[in-house]
Image (tube, rainbow, N blue to C red):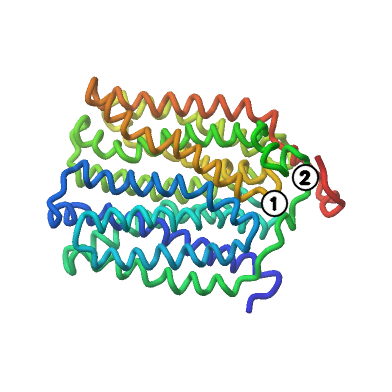
Amino acid sequence: MATAKSYPYAALILLTALNLLNYVDRSVLFAVQPLVQSEFRLSNAQVGYLTSAFLLFYMVAAPFVGPLADRFSRKRIIVSGAIFWSALTLLTAVTHTYSELLIRHTLVGIGEATFVTIAPTFVADLFPEEQRGRILGVFYLAIPVGTAAGYLLGGHLSPHFGWRFPFYVAAAPGFLLALTVLFLPEPERGHFDLLQETPERATLIGMARNPAFWSATLGMAMMTFALGGIQVWMPTFLSRARGYSLESANFMFGIIVVVDGILASLAGGWLGDYLLPKMKGAYYFVSAASMAVGVPLMIVALFWRGPVMMPAIAMAAFFLLLNTSPLNAAVLNSVGAHIRATAFAVSLFVYHLLGDVPSPTLMGYVADKRTLQTAFILPVIAMVLSSAILFYGMKFAPDMRIEDSSRGNGART
């Protein structure tokens, strides 16, 4: 049993491991997609619709899960959701029709929404407000590492054992980790919060007119639009417009995403926490500034050929991914603990609805009408909008500037 001092870190490691499996599960299908397409004789549209259906159900389920988590045990909902999606991952290995696979994928979206919506609020109650940026940086390491692990798992095992076998391997640890979560003590909601529970922060009606919440959410939506479109189309851009083989384009961009994702997630969280006691709206500032720096780098990456292109892509991706931890911390800190899961669910719904759900399709539409290079102007515009929204949102951010001696002396506004 972990001691009271080590428990928060043990819980963080466990939830991060479960989050990593969440992203492994998503990307295994991408790795074995050609084999699935061949066996079921699917069109490209049918294959693409598997991911669209997943995101749609994932997005729609979140606002229903959030209020439940604000009223009932978050731990039990996390465990139920993890067992549910792990079981469905296991069942993928025995699906024999496209319809079965599609139903499975939509249900996985619902199961994963229970975890992604609730786990960050659980983590937030384990640590003080001024540490949440770097703590979320650790938690969201699961995105690049889990995504890469899914590609490696599926890509390595499927040629030797068939496309179904990697799903057995991906499912098994989920059951074990989910059951281990049952032994975690449930943290008290708002245990470390010192910000005052004003009506704007503590009620759903107040949240609807909370500019700190909405500026963080809309800034994240534009960031997600850019990131979603770039992730889908960059390997194709490198292959079609810049002469790389598809294999080398995927390999190089995959390495960039993994390395940048790890470094940027940790750096963004640390920088946000470092500035938090020194300036109002530190999380907003880090995200806005990094997005602004990323814009000219992305323009160089798109319109300059030669040896400068790949370093520019790598640097632009780093500054884009730097936003993950500070933006999530900004959303969590913008509301009180007792509506935090609901707020996070609403935020998730909005930033997927305006972000990575439409961006790949819109970029594809522009590419069909013009060129793929022209289509990349859309994520650049989204990055500019995200930066502007977040710079504007700084003035609404809760004031976290405190002296160390004031901690523990009560709430502040």
Quarter of the figure with residue 203: top right
- SS at badge 1: helix
Q: Residue 207 appears at what percent x and percent y?
A: 66, 38
Q: Where is residue 165? Give x, y as percent.
A: 24, 68
Q: Which residue is mark 1?
A: 338
Residue drawn at x 40%, y 48% is 57
Q: Nearer the viewer, residue 261 or 338?
A: 338
In this view of the protein, can residue 396 be seen by the observer? yes
Q: Looking at this view, is 379 or 209 the one in front? A: 209
Identify which residue is drawn at 40% across, 29% down: 379
Examine the rendered structure and indicate whether residue 1 appears above or below residue 341: below
Residue at x 31% of width, y 23% of height = 303
Query: Crowdedness of circle 1 by 10 Å Cα count: few (<14), some, many (20+)?
Result: some
Instruction: Using the rendered image of the protein, determine whether residue 311 is visible from the camera's viewpoint.
Output: no
Disc 1 + disc 2, Cβ < 8 Å: yes
Q: Is residue 39 above or below residue 52?
A: below
Expressed as whole percent of the image width and height from the top left, the position of residue 198 reads: 78, 40
**Residue at the top extreme, as displayed:** 370
- Under mark 2, the amino acid is Glu
Residue at the disc numbered 2 = 197
Q: Using the image as rendered, state which of residue 71 and residue 243 is in the foreground.
A: 71
Q: Position of residue 372 (x, y in %)?
A: 26, 27
In the orientation shown, which residue stands out farthest toward the bottom? 1
Q: CA distance from mark 1 to mark 2?
A: 9 Å
Three-letter code, disc 1: His
Quadrant containing the N terminus is: bottom right
Disc marking residue 377: none
> Residue 156, located in which quarter of the rendered image?
bottom left
54 sits left or right of 246 in the view: right
* Quadrant hosting residue 97: bottom left
